[in-house]
C-alpha cells in the first residue's frame, strides 16, 4: 500500500475514533441511545481503519 494511502487511512481512523469517543459519553448521559450506538460504531470503525493503516 502506498504511503499516501496509509496516511489517509490513519488520519480517517484517528478523526473517526476521536469523534466517536467524544460523542459517546454525552449521548449516554442524556439517554440518546441511537446517537450513542452510532458513536460506538464510529469509534470501532476508526479503530479498524487504524488497524488497516498500520498493518502490512
Image: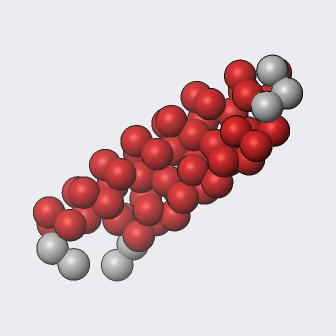
Image point 82% across, 21% down: which residue? 29
Q: Which residue is at a point 69% across and 33% down the rendered structure image?
A: 24
Which sits in the foreground, 50 or 27? 27
Work out whether 47 lies above or below 30.
Answer: below
**Residue drawn at x 49%, y 53% as measured from the top left:** 46
Which residue of the protein is positioned furthest toward the right in this rendering?
31
Whether 33 is drawn above or below 5: the answer is above
Is 48 left or right of 23, judged from the image as shown?
Answer: left
**55 versus 49 height, above or below:** below
Tell me the colour scheme of the image: secondary structure
In the picture shown, does residue 44 fall above or below 29? below
Residue 7: give x, y in percent of width and height.
23, 57
* Front residue of this view, candidates 16 and 30: 30
User: Is 7 on the left or on the right of 10, as rendered?
Assistant: left
**x, y (%) of residue 26?**
71, 22
Quadrant (top left, top right, bottom left, bottom right) of the N terminus: bottom left
Amino acid at each position: 500500500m502506498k504511503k499516501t494511502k496509509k496516511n489517509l487511512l490513519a488520519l480517517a481512523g484517528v478523526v473517526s475514533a476521536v469523534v466517536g469517543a467524544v460523542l459517546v459519553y454525552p449521548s449516554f448521559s442524556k439517554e440518546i441511545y441511537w446517537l450513542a450506538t452510532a458513536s460506538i460504531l464510529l469509534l470501532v470503525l476508526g479503530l479498524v481503519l487504524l488497524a488497516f493503516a498500520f498493518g502490512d
